[in-house]
Structures are given as C-alpha cells and as structure tokens.
Amino acid sequence: MLNGIRFAIAGEGTGLYITLSEYYESSSLTTLAVMQEFGKFTVRGTGCYDAAHIVANHAALTLLTDAVLSDWQCSVHEAFAEYPKEFKPLAIALNATGDGARKFPDGSSGVPYILATNITIGCDICLPYPGQNLCHPTTSCTPTPYGTMCLTRPGYKADDVANDDVTLQWRMKWPVPGHEHRVAVAPGRSANTLCDPKNVGPDVCKEVAVADCSAVVPEDRRFESAHYDTDQQAIHEGEL
C-alpha cells in the first residue's frame, strides 16, 4: 500500500491511489463506476486467489516480489477484465483464467489485479514521429513485426539491465530468419553495452531473453508492422 501511495504522489501532477479491497470478490463482471472519469474499467471477483506474479518494472514495486504478494490466504480478491490502454498491469493473478486473462512478455499468463499508468511491461512500441520519438540516442525507432520499437545497434544491449528482464529489453521471433539477434529496449533506455562476446554469428546477443510480443502488442498498435526492415543484412556464422 505504501509503495502505491508513493507512486501516486511521485509525479508532477495530481496522483490517485485506489484500492478495491475485497468489495468485488464475489461479483460477476461489473463496470467500475468510481473510475469512469478515466475510461471504462470492468472488474470481476476471483474468490480467494493466492498466486500473484509481477509483470512490470517500476519503482512502485520496490522490495516487492512474487513471494511477498502471494500466499496471504486471499492474496487477490478481484481482477480487471477491461481497462483503458493508458493503464498497464503491474501484477496479475497468476494462471487465472476467464474474463481478462492474457499472456505477458515473460511467458506468464493471468488476469491483472494491480494497474498503473506510466509503467513498462515490455514489448513497448515507439512513435516514429518528430517530437514523439522517445528512444534514447543509442537506439533507433525501427519497424519490427510487432510495431516500431527502439532497437539497439547490432551487437549491443541495454545498459544495467538483466538479460532476462523482458520489461526493459528483449529479443523477438522474426518471420524472416537472421534477425533474431536484434535487441529492443524500452523507450528512453540507453544501450551502450556490448553483448556477450561468447555468442557470435547468428547467436549474437543470444543471452538476452526472447519476449512473446505477439501476446502484448495488439494489431492496431503495430505501426508500420508490415514494413519492417527485411533488407538489413542477416548475421551469419563467423560475423560480428
């Protein structure tokens, strides 16, 4: 709760922290009237669900882990089936099914029960327009099969990010072989770190985890998805 309040007051404008407690624990799909000023939210009860999983990277989650959020007998009382695209999940009822269930870049699935704005969950797209491109200068807003993303230079990865943290950097499955080495990072993230020199040729940057971006980026957000750069030279054995 304290982390949520700190997050709400950390921005430049007015923040808002809302907890539903267990009010909708036994409810069927219900529109959340208290949030209607921000868009349409629908919520449903989960009963006493006890497995929680963090899917985002943000200061609001400092010191929190899956273990800390889970096994409280009733760790999750209700979850969100629908919410505006400006809001993203921080944590989910892990492996819960039904309304609102979806997959996430780390390979997990479930129904979101903690939402926030201005967070990163991975597979984030960039806007390739003047004044809207937030990519760090060490990356470029480039078309991919899943929309325009901040891609690093070949052979580089994000600075100070764990290889398996797909909320901040990731590789993707490409329909055209030879591009799997490309690393994408969250907008604003710098990428001056060389990939592990042990991985060469087609395996360059292999240590960076592959994210399931098809489960995250909907079709209507895939800017220029049909025009990603297939002309870029693929990396072959013995190169780079």
Image (cartoon, rainbow, N blue to C red):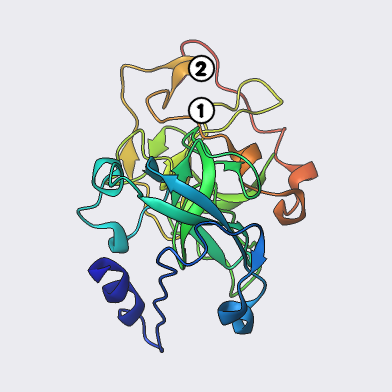
Of pointers 1 and 2, the one earlier in the residue sequence: 1
Q: Nearer the viewer, residue 176 or 64?
A: 64
Residue 62, position as x, y percentages in the image: 23, 57
Calculate the distance from the C-alpha at mark 1 to the C-alpha at mark 2. Answer: 7 Å
Q: Secondary structure at mark 1?
A: loop
Proximity of marks 1 and 2: CB atoms separated by less than 8 Å: yes
- Quadrant where the N terminus sits is bottom left
Look at label 1 and name its amino acid.
His
Residue name at image x 46 percent, y 11 percent? 238
Residue name at image x 44 percent, y 55 percent? 77
Residue 20, position as x, y percentages in the image: 44, 69
Mark seen at residue 202: 2
Residue 36, position as x, y percentages in the image: 63, 80
How crowded pointer 2 is (Cα within 10 Å; few <14, some 14-19, many 20+) is rated as some
- Quadrant where the C terminus sits is top left
Q: Nearer the viewer, residue 187 or 112?
A: 112
- Classify 77 as above or below 157: below
| Residue 5, quarter of the rendered image | bottom left
Residue that carries the numbered disc 1 in the rendered image: 181
Look at label 2 and name its amino acid.
Pro
Image-based side of 208 in relation to 69, left or right: right
- Classify 111 as above or below 22: above
Residue name at image x 63 percent, y 72 percent? 130
Residue 129, position as x, y percentages in the image: 66, 68
Q: Secondary structure at mark 2?
A: helix
| Residue 180, quarter of the rendered image | top right
Image-based side of 95 in relation to 205, left or right: right
